[in-house]
């Protein structure tokens, strides 16, 4: 019935992938959204909130909610910028820095398992095609 429906097939796939990432990050006490955001903050400290939202292709309100959760967990802090006191740079805390290796290891493990299940070439092709489709639709 939905063999040729992009919406149905991408959301069905997203639900399956979401379950895998949820299991991977649960021992860290993070949702997949929080974990991916934290990975960006750890790699690019001091990004502004709107830059972080753009990097993750999410809305600013979604970024705010996810950041609020990370801040409550003591993993990020917002610091006013020198250029504009109304803007906040997002910085990882020492606790987040301690989690960095484990966070990346969990991500790598899931990717490795998916590559094993799908095959390296097919995995890489799928990710590449999805990125191209996303870019075309933006």
Image (cartoon, grey):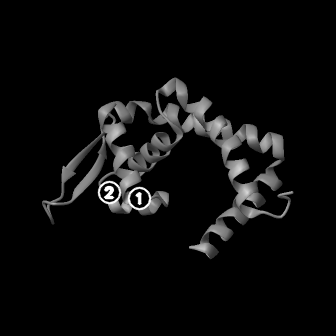
Mark 2 Cα-neighbour bin, 10 Å: few <14, some 14–19, many ≥20: some
Name the image quarter holding residue 114. top right
- Where residue 36 sits: x, y (%)? 50, 45
Are the residues flagged by discs 1 and 2 in contact, CB closer than 8 Å?
Answer: yes
Q: Quadrant of the N terminus?
A: bottom right
> Residue beneath label 2, please?
49
Q: Give the SS element for disc 1.
A: helix
What is the count of numbered marks?
2
- Where residue 38 sits: x, y (%)? 42, 43
| Label disc, if present, on residue 44 of the rendered structure | none
Question: Residue at point 43% right, 31% down?
Answer: 99
Q: CA distance from mark 1 to mark 2?
A: 6 Å
Name the image quarter holding residue 23. top right
Name the image quarter holding residue 122. bottom right
| Label disc, if present, on residue 53 of the rendered structure | 1
Above or below residue 90? Residue 18 is above
| Residue nearest the viewer, comparing 57 with 112 | 57
Q: Give the SS element for disc 2.
A: helix
| Residue nearest the viewer, comparing 7 with 57 | 7
Mark 1 Cα-neighbour bin, 10 Å: few <14, some 14–19, many ≥20: some
- In the rendered view, does 101 fall on the left or right side of 64? right
Question: Residue at point 60% right, 72% down?
Answer: 135
Residue furthest front as drawn: 1
- Where residue 108 sits: x, y (%)? 63, 39
Question: Residue at point 26% right, 54% down?
Answer: 89
Above or below residue 108? Residue 50 is below
Above or below residue 35? Residue 61 is below
Q: Quadrant of the C terminus?
A: bottom right
- Where residue 51 sits: x, y (%)? 37, 62
């Amino acid at each position: 019935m939905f063999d040729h429906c992009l919406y149905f097939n991408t959301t069905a796939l997203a639900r399956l992938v979401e379950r895998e990432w949820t299991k991977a990050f649960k021992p860290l006490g993070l949702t997949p959204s929080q974990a991916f955001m934290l990975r960006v903050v750890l790699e690019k400290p001091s990004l502004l909130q709107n830059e972080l939202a753009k990097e993750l292709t999410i809305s600013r309100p979604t970024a705010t909610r996810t950041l609020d959760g990370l801040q409550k967990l003591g993993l990020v802090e917002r610091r006013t910028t020198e250029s504009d006191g109304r803007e906040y740079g997002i910085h990882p805390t020492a606790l987040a820095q301690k989690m960095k290796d484990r966070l990346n290891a969990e991500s790598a493990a899931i990717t490795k398992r998916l590559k094993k299940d799908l095959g390296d070439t097919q995995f890489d092709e799928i990710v590449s095609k999805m990125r191209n489709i996303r870019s075309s639709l933006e």
